[in-house]
Image: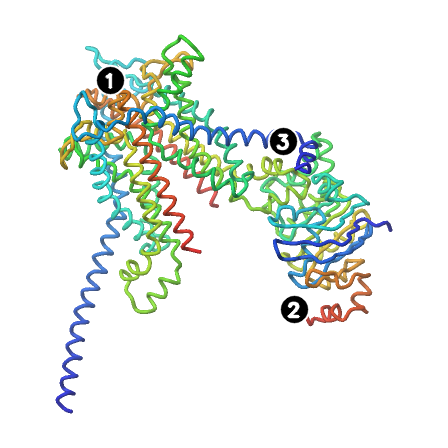
Amino acid sequence: MPIKFDIKKADLFYGDFQALKNINLEIKDKEITAFIGPSGCGKSTLLKSLNRMNDLVEGCRITGDFRLDGQDIYKDIEITELRKRVGMVFQKPNLFPMSIYDNIAYGPRTHGIKKKAELDEIVETSLRQASIWEECKDRLKKSALGTSGGQQQRLCIARALAVKPEVILMDEPTSALDPISTIKIEELCQQIKNDYTIIIVTHNMQQATRISDKTAFFLHGEIVEFDTTEKIFSSPSQQKTLDYITGRFG
Amino acid sequence: MIITDIENKRTAELTEGVSAGRRGLHRFAEKTMGAVFFISACVSIVAVVLICAFMFIKGCPAIGEIGLSDFLLGTSWKPRDSNPSFGIFPMIVGSLYVTAGAIIVGVPIGLLTAVFMAKFCPKRLYKWLMPPINLLAGIPSIVYGFFGMIVIVPLIRNVFGGNGRGNSILTASILLGIMILPTIVGMSQSAMKAVPESYYEGALALGATHERAVCTVIIPAAKSGILASVILAVGRAIGETMAVIMIAGNQPRLPGSVLDGVRTLTANIVIEMSYATGLHYDALIATGVVLFVFILLINLLFNVITSKKER
Amino acid sequence: MSEKMKTYKAHPMSLVFSVITKIAVTITIAIFFLIVGYVIIKGVPYLKPSLFAWKYTSENASMMPAIITTFEMVGIALLIAAPLGVFCAIYLVEYAKKGNKLVKWIRLTTETLSGIPSIIYGLFGNMFFVIALKWKLSLMAGACTLAIMVLPLIIRSTEEALKAVDDSFREGSYGLGAGKLRTIFVIVLPPAMSGILSGIILAVGRIVGETAALIYTAGTVAKIPGLFDSGRTLAIHMYSLSNEGLHMNEASATAVVLLVTVLLLNGLASLVARKLSKGEK
C-alpha cells in the first residue's frame, strides 16, 4: 500500500504549551489507523492538524512536514481543497439545522455542484454508503435534527462521504452514542474501508482492536508506539504501551 | 454568688425580651417590604392597563363619531374646516412608506455590519468598533432630526433638485435607516454569536470557506434572532416622532413619489396637538390608537418569534 | 495573507462577501462619527458664555433654564422610577416562584412598555396626568410620564444584575439565619449595584434626550419651573428653537451640549457595567 499521509518532525504549540512533540508517522492508503491514548495526550490534536482544523484555535503554532500524497498540506494545497480531500466526523454529531437532504448536499453544493439530478444521486449514494438510506429515504426533506443520536452520527458520516474525500478523520465518533449505534458505526467503517483511508481517534481500546489495521499509542504529546493493531495489543515493544492497554493508566 | 446568678438571669430575661421585640420588628419589616416589592412589581401591569384604557376609551368614540372607514381610509385631513374631515389614510401610508424605506436602507447595512461584528471582527478591533455602534442607540432623536435637517435634507435637495425642499420620504427613510442600525446590529450579532461553534466547524470540515460557512450555515441558523431584530426595528421606525417631523415635510396628503413629503401618524399627533380641541383632539388620540395597535401587533409578532426561538 | 488570497482566488464570491461586510461596517462607524463630528463642528462656534445666562429672553436664547429643568426632570423621574424598578426586579428575582402567573404578566407588560414609542407616552401623560389629574402642563406630569417610560429599562438591568449574583451567596446568608430582607439588602444588592447603576445611568440618558413624551406633558415654557409649573428640558429647548427657526445657531449649540451629555452618560453606563463583569472574575 502507498503512503497517504506522511508526517515528519511535527511539533504543535498552543501558546507556550507544547501539545505535540516530534511526531513522525506514515499512514498507509486504504487502511484504518487508530489513535489511542489517555485524554490530553495529543491524539485529537494531531487528527485536527491533518485537515487544518487547528487553524481555528487562537495561538496555535505548527511546525514540521505534513504531506498528503507528497504535497505539503500547509503550503501546496489550498485549505478548502484540503478539507474536501480530507473529511472529518466530529465527536458529537453536528448536523446543520436543515433538512437531511440539504445536510448531505451541503458539501457537493459547496464545491460547485448545482444540478438537481446530480445532487439527488450523490445524496442517495452517500446515504446508501453510510447504510442509512432505508431509514431516511422517506424523510429527506424533514429536519435532520429530528433523528436519533446514532442516526445523526451516521448522517454526519454520509455528509462527509458526499464530498468524495480520500481520507476520513473521525474524532471519537462513538463516544456520545449507545452501544448499538456504536456497533453500527463500526460496521460502517469496515464497509467503507476499501474506498477510503480512515483515521479514528478512540478512547475505547476494544474499538481499536475491532476495526483498525494500525494503531498509534500517544502519551504526553508523543507517539510511544506505532504498529499493526495486532502487535500493539498482543506484544507491544514498549512498557508504557503495555501499561496502558492493560489498564494501568486511567 | 446567688445575687450575681439572679442578676445574670435577669439580664438574660431582659435581652430575650429585647430580641423578641426585635424579632417582631423584623417580621413586620419582612412583611411590609415584601408587600412593597409586590406592589412595585405590579406597577408595570397597572401602567399598561391605564395606557390602554385611556387610549382606547378616549380614541374609540372619536373613531365611532368619524366613522371607522372614513377615519382609516379617508384621504382628506381637514380638521379645522367648517365641514371638517378626519381621514388619516395619508398618514398611515406615510408611516408605512418611511418604515419600509428605513428597512430597505437599514437592514442590509445593519445585517452586514452584524455579520462582520459577529464573525469577521478580530477581538482587538471589536473592542473599538462596538462602542460607537452602541452609542448610535444613545443619540437622542432630536439630534438625529437636527443632523437630518442640516445634512441629509440639503443633500437630497442638491442631488435630486427642484421638486420640494428636500423634505421627503427618501430623506426620512435614510435617517430612520440610520436610527435602526444599532437595534439590528446588536440583536443580530448576538443571535449569530449564539449559533453553536460545531455548525461552523462542520461546514469548514466539508471544505467551505469562512464566508460560505457564515452565509449558508450561521445566518440561516440565526434567522429567528435576525428576524426579531428587524421586527423590533420596524417598531422603532414606525414609532419615531421627532426626527421624522424635522425632515419628512409633514404634508397630510398621499405622496406621489419618494421625493414628496409625507406626514406620519406620529407627526400628525405632535404637530396639531398644541391647538387641537374637541373632536380634533380626540381624532389625534385616535391617530395614536391606530399607531398603538400597530405597535401592539409588532410586539406580539416579536414575542411569538422570540418564544419560538427559545423552544 | 497569501494563503488567504489563494483561498479567495479559488472562491471569488467569498472575497466579495468579505469585502461587502467590511464596507457595511465602515459605513456604520462612519455614520456615527459623521453625526457626532457634524453636530460638534456646527455647534461649538456658537457656544458662547451668554448662552449660559440665568434668564431666557427672546434676544438671548439662554439654555441655562433648560439645563436646570433637565436636572430637575431627571431627579424627579428617577426618584419615582428607580425604587419602583429596583423593587419590581427584586420581587421578580427573589420572591416570585417559578411558574407564577403574575410574573408572566409582569414580563409581558414590561416588554410591552419598552416597545411603546415615546409619543404614545406623551399622549397618555397628557390625557392622564395633565388633564385627568389636573396637573396641567408641569414638571411633575412630565416626570411621571418619563418614569413609566424608563421603568422597563431599570427593571431589566436590575433583574440581570440580581440574577448574576451567585446563589451560593444567598444560601450562605440563609444558612447563617439571616432573613430574606437582610439577605437581599446586605448580600445580594451590593454586588449587583454596578449593574443596577448602569441601568439607571442609561435611564438618565433617555430622559435627557427625550422630546416627544414631554412636549405635551411638561410643556415648553423656558423658565426654571417649580414642581407644578411647565418647563422645557434641554431636548425640548432644542426642538423649540429649531422649530421656530429664529435661533438656529443657538439650536446648534444646544445640540452639542445635549449630544455630549448623552454620549458621556452612555459611555459611563457601559464603563460601570464593565466594572461589574470584571468584578465577577
**Residue type highlighted by circle 3:** Leu
Q: Is residue C144 visible?
A: no
> Residue under mark 3: which chain is it in?
C
Q: Percent x, y for residue B265? A: 32, 23
Tell which residue pokes out farthest to the right in this image. A1
Say whether mark 3 and mark 1 are on the same chain: yes
Residue B238, picture quadrant? top left
Name the one closer to the observer, B33 or B9: B9
Mark 1 vs 3, N-terminal side: 3
**Residue A250 got which mark?**
2
Tell me what residue is drawn at x 17 percent, y 31 percent: C54
State the separation of the CA atoms marked 1 and 2. 83 Å
Q: Nearer the viewer, mark 1 or mark 2?
A: 1
Q: Is residue A197 visible?
A: yes
C252 lies above or below B114: above
State the separation of the CA atoms marked 1 and 3. 52 Å
- Where disc 2 sits, the SS reads loop
State left or right for residue B89 relative to residue B2: right
**Residue type highlighted by circle 1:** Leu
> Residue under mark 2: which chain is it in?
A
- Where disc 3 sits, the SS reads helix
Say whether mark 2 and mark 3 are on the same chain: no
Circle 3 crowding by C-alpha within 10 Å: few under 14, some 14–19, many from 20: some
Tell which residue pokes out farthest to the top in this image. B162
Instruction: Write down the residue under mark 1.
Output: C246
Instruction: Write down the residue under mark 3.
Output: C15
Circle 2 crowding by C-alpha within 10 Å: few under 14, some 14–19, many from 20: few
Q: Nearer the viewer, mark 3 or mark 2?
A: 3
Residue A210, picture quadrant? bottom right
> Residue under mark 1: which chain is it in?
C
Tell me what residue is drawn at x 29 percent, y 49 percent: C86
